[in-house]
Every structure is written in structure tokens, then in C-alpha cells.
């Protein structure tokens, strides 16, 4: 296999690990709009980094962490404003990004791939970075499995148990930020929300155990990414949208299976 | 007599300049079973949040186990209202009960003893066949018993119940209060309810709340207390001893 394609397929698998693990919490805690907002906020960082002439991925990571931290802060201090804030960051992130790109000199063609993704641009540095983040996410979720379960199941009770819920929620938001940046590479900002939520939502239709849900979400995500990428290479289609449509297909199959099971 | 395990001295709470609770004075002792009654909007939930340390008083001092509420709540078991969280969450009954042993140490491991205690408590609340079921599959009464087992996991010295009769039928409620009487031998209980009939069965003392608290450390309530709490005329109903709630009622 061509090493370019091999890197892309490997990236699909690595990105799916983060998407499945973190996406499960996003879905069961109903944080999908937070993840969408963080991904769009990251575009502001991409624009600024392009303007300053540094790696856009660094800008995206910094902005994603800042926006998720800010949402986490507002969520605790003024929860009544959380919804409006999420919508605002969503559009302001895009606006800032586009303005910086407008003022940037030179070639900015790659920016299109940040919007819609182009997994074929995966470098070996990207692979190492994502593998490292996967290891971090797996380690954190292994060590904090019970507190994270308590937080996402019954936040009020977790607080009464003296579990540091604010720290833990902020930590979860930072994990969402890192995962959004990872996925941004493969499917682009606009489609991150789908890859972060649909595989986990599909898995939730199939199982009622959090551990199994996370493993299934990784498998669905990997399956959708690999099939989507294969289709895009075979038929010369853009990779991001192909991956997303396969993800939707998997969700539809799980939905039908679940309802057939219910009626039989 | 023991020292109070919970002490509220002149506690008031305001939200956005609106007074919710005013000058609450209350002492709870280890053997108490106190019911706090009051109409909707009387500040019952706010009072519980203050006791549990999720809100801080704007005035006054609240001590729980002679410490601040965040420290003191380590010895408090809490049974929330059932509707306060998503029951579609993918979690088994056993995992839900085991949640009760978690604390500030994020890396705390669940021990074999914890598993054994969880099973014992599920048996105590008559939910031993439910351990592997999903929380979302339970009926209202079953879920309440499971959440009670969760509250008992850390062997609390004070049990706080928020509207426990809200979503259960009468036989379930009957068993629940029998269990409460049994638990009251080892721990104090505070129950918040708008259901006068429910509190009359089990509580040893009753307090009336409507922004201010009327509490005389006994089970007799005057018509004046009730009517000032409910802001309307309330018919006096007496079940007779041992379920007498209200004083003798003489027609003038």
C-alpha cells in the first residue's frame, strides 16, 4: 500500500480511539453543542496561526482549549448564559478565523481542508501527536472511570460526595477540545460534531453498558472512517463528507436494528 | 443529650435580592427523625441545598458535624428526588450504588468490601435481584430504593430525604417508612415533604417552613403554624395515637 494511504488509514484508526472514548461522554452528558462550539472556536486559532505564520494546528489546539475552558467556567458561574455563549463562540470563532485569513498574505489554500478535512494530508508528526493524545485519553479515562461516570450520570450527587466536579468537568471539556482538534484533521471543523457524536449515539442504541458503549463507539468510528476513506480514494471524493455519510449510514442501521429488536 | 450534628444559627438565604429563607434556627440531634413540611416555593429545596453545602447562606452560620458543610456532608447520605437526573444513562443498579463510596480522592479504587456492602444494602432495601439491571428499567419505587442504597453506602450519620413519597404508591411508601424507622436507630433523618400524610407516619418531630421555620422539637403542630406556612386555611386531620400530628381540634 502507498505510504500516503497507509498514514491516512492509520490516522483513521487513531482518531477513532479518541472519538469513541470522549464522544461517549459527549453523547450521554448531552454536550454535543459544546463540542461543535469548541471545534468552530478552534477555527479562530487556525486563522490567527496562519496570520502569524505558525502551524495552524497549534493555533487550533490553543483556541480549542481556551474556548472549552471558557465554556466550562461560564457553566459553573452563570449557567443561564451557557447556551447563548456556546452559540456565540460557534460563530465568533469562525468570524475571527475568516478575518485573520483575509489579512494573511500568501497561500492559504490548505484552510479549506481544515473546514472539510483532508485526511490524505496526514504527516508522520500528526500520527505521533494523535497516538500520544490517544495514550493520554486512554490513561485518563482508565484512572478516572468511576468519577467520570458519577459526573456524567448525576452531577449534583457527585458534588455532594465531594468529587471535584468543577475540575473534572473542566478536564472533560479539555479532552473534548483535544479530540476536536484530532478529528479536525480527518473530517474538518464543520463535520467534527458528527464524528464525535454519531458513532457513540449508534453504540448507545446497541448497548446499555458504558464500557461496551465506548468500545463499540471506537469500532463504529473506525469502521466509518476506514470505509469513508476507501470510498473517497476509490471514487475520487472528498474524504470528510464521505466519512460522515458512512457514519450516518451506520447510525441508520443501528436505529433500524434497535427498532426491529423492539418490535420482535 | 448528644451534641447537635446539625446546627443552623440565624441562617438566611437570598437569591437575586429576593429573600428565600429568613432567620432559620434549627438543631438536629443523632436520634432525630425530623420532617420539614411546607407548600411549594416555601424554600424546602433551598434549605436542603444549604444543609448539603451546595449553596452557602447569605447570613448566619450552618455547622454540620461541628464542621463547615462541605466537610460535614461526608457523613450525610442524600436521597434526591427521582426526576433530578437522566434515567436513560447507561448504568447498572450495582454501579449506581457503588457511586456512593466515591469521594474527593479521584483515584479511589472500589474494593471487594465495597461490592459486598453494595449487595448487602440492595438486599436491605429489597432490591437484591436488581443489581445487574439498568437504572432506566426500574419503576419509581425500585429506583427510589436503589438510590437509598447508594445514600447508605458511606454509612452516614445523617440521612436527608427530598420528597421521598413523591413518585411511589402507598404500599411502597409504607415499606419505605418502616425501613426509615429501622434506619433511624443508627442515624438521624431529615425528610422534606409537602405531603402531610406521609410525614405523620414516620417522623418523630415536625417543622413547618415557609421562608421562616416553626419548630418546637415535637410532633404537635398548632393550626397557626400550619396556616402561616401554607398561607391558607388547612383542615386539621388527626390519625390518633401514634399517628397524631395535630393538636386536639375544638370547634368554637
Image (cartoon, grey):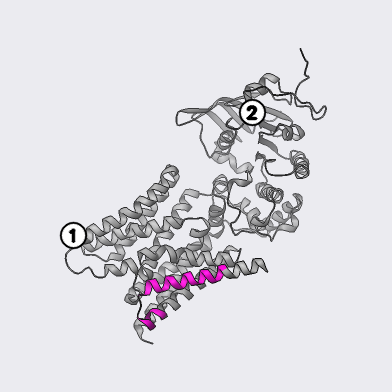
How far apart marks 2 and 1 lie (CA) works out to 67 Å
- Number of the label disc, if any, that sits on residue B163: none
> Would you call the spot at circle 2 few (<14 residues within 10 Å), some (14-19), or many (20 or more)?
some
Q: Residue at x 38, y 51 (%)?
A: A87
On the image, the x and y values in percent for residue A117 come to 34, 70
Quadrant of the frame with the N terminus of chain A: bottom left
On the image, the x and y values in percent for residue A245 come to 44, 71
> Would you call the spot at circle 1 few (<14 residues within 10 Å), some (14-19), or many (20 or more)?
few
Residue at the outermost top position: B252
Residue A250 sits inside the magenta stretch: yes
Q: Residue at x 67, y 36 (%)?
A: B191
List the residue tagged with mark 1: A103
List the residue tagged with mark 2: B27
On the image, the x and y values in percent for residue B245 come to 75, 27
Q: Chain of mark 2?
A: B
Quadrant of the frame with the C terminus of chain A: bottom right
- Residue B243 in the image: above or below residue A53: above
Instruction: Say whether residue B178 is left or right of residue A149.
Output: right
Q: Which residues are magenta?
A: A231-255
Residue A98 sits inside the magenta stretch: no
- Residue B41 in the image: above or below residue B250: below
On the image, the x and y values in percent for residue A15 come to 42, 70
Q: Mark 2: which secondary structure?
A: strand
Between tags 2 and 1, which lies in front?
1
Q: Main secondary structure of the magenta part?
A: helix
Residue A139 seen anywhere in this rendered image of the structure: no
Q: Mark 1: which secondary structure?
A: helix
Residue B142 seen anywhere in this rendered image of the structure: yes
Q: Count of labels shown?
A: 2
Amino acid at each position: 500500500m502507498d505510504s500516503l494511504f497507509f498514514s491516512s488509514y492509520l490516522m483513521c484508526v487513531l482518531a477513532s480511539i479518541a472519538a469513541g472514548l470522549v464522544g461517549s461522554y459527549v453523547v450521554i452528558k448531552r454536550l454535543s453543542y459544546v463540542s461543535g462550539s469548541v471545534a468552530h472556536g478552534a477555527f479562530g486559532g487556525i486563522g490567527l496561526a496562519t496570520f502569524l505564520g505558525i502551524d495552524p494546528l497549534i493555533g487550533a489546539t490553543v483556541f480549542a482549549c481556551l474556548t472549552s475552558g471558557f465554556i466550562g467556567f461560564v457553566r459553573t458561574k452563570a449557567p443561564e448564559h451557557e447556551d447563548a455563549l456556546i452559540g456565540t463562540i460557534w460563530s465568533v470563532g469562525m468570524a475571527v478565523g475568516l478575518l485573520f485569513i483575509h489579512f494573511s498574505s500568501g497561500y492559504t489554500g490548505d484552510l479549506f481542508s481544515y473546514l472539510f478535512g483532508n485526511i490524505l494530508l496526514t504527516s508522520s508528526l500528526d500520527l505521533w501527536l494523535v497516538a500520544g493524545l490517544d495514550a493520554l485519553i486512554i490513561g485518563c479515562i482508565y484512572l478516572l472511570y468511576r468519577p467520570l461516570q458519577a459526573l456524567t450520570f448525576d452531577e449534583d450527587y457527585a458534588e455532594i460526595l465531594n468529587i471535584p466536579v468543577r475540575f473534572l468537568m473542566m478536564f472533560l471539556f479539555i479532552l473534548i477540545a483535544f479530540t476536536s482538534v484530532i478529528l479536525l484533521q480527518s473530517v474538518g471543523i464543520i463535520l467534527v460534531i458528527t464524528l464525535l457524536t454519531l458513532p457513540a449515539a449508534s453504540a448507545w442504541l446497541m448497548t446499555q453498558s458504558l464500557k461496551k458503549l465506548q468500545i463499540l463507539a471506537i469500532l463504529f468510528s473506525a469502521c466509518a472512517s476506514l470505509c469513508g476513506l476507501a470510498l473517497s480514494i476509490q471514487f475520487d471524493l472528498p474524504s470528510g463528507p464521505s466519512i460522515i455519510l458512512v457514519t450516518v449510514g451506520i447510525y441508520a442501521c443501528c436505529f433500524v436494528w434497535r427498532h426491529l429488536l423492539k418490535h420482535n | 443529650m448528644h451534641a447537635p450534628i446539625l446546627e443552623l444559627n440565624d441562617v438566611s438565604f437570598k437569591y437575586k435580592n429576593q429573600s428565600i429563607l429568613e432567620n432559620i434556627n434549627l438543631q438536629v440531634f443523632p436520634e432525630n427523625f425530623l420532617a420539614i413540611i411546607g407548600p411549594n416555593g416555601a424554600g424546602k429545596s433551598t434549605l436542603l441545598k444549604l444543609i448539603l453545602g451546595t449553596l452557602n447562606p447569605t447570613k448566619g452560620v450552618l455547622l454540620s458535624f461541628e464542621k463547615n458543610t462541605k466537610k460535614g456532608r461526608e457523613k450525610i447520605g442524600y436521597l434526591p428526588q427521582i426526576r433530578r437526573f437522566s434515567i436513560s444513562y447507561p448504568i447498572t443498579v450495582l454501579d449506581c450504588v457503588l457511586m456512593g463510596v466515591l469521594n474527593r480522592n479521584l483515584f479511589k479504587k472500589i474494593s471487594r468490601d465495597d461490592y459486598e456492602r453494595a449487595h448487602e444494602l440492595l438486599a436491605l432495601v429489597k432490591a437484591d435481584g436488581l443489581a445487574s439491571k439498568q437504572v432506566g428499567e426500574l419503576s419509581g419505587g425500585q429506583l427510589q430504593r436503589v438510590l437509598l442504597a447508594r445514600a447508605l453506602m458511606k454509612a452516614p450519620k445523617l440521612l436527608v430525604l427530598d420528597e421521598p413519597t413523591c413518585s411511589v404508591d402507598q404500599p411502597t411508601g409504607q415499606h419505605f417508612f418502616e425501613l426509615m424507622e429501622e434506619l433511624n436507630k443508627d442515624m438521624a433523618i431529615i425528610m422534606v415533604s409537602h405531603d402531610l400524610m406521609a410525614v405523620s407516619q414516620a417522623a418523630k418531630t415536625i417543622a413547618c417552613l415557609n421562608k421562616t421555620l416553626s419548630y418546637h422539637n415535637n410532633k404537635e403542630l398548632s393550626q397557626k403554624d400550619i396556616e402561616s406556612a401554607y398561607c391558607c386555611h388547612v383542615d386539621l386531620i388527626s390519625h390518633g395515637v401514634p399517628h397524631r400530628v395535630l393538636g386536639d381540634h375544638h370547634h368554637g
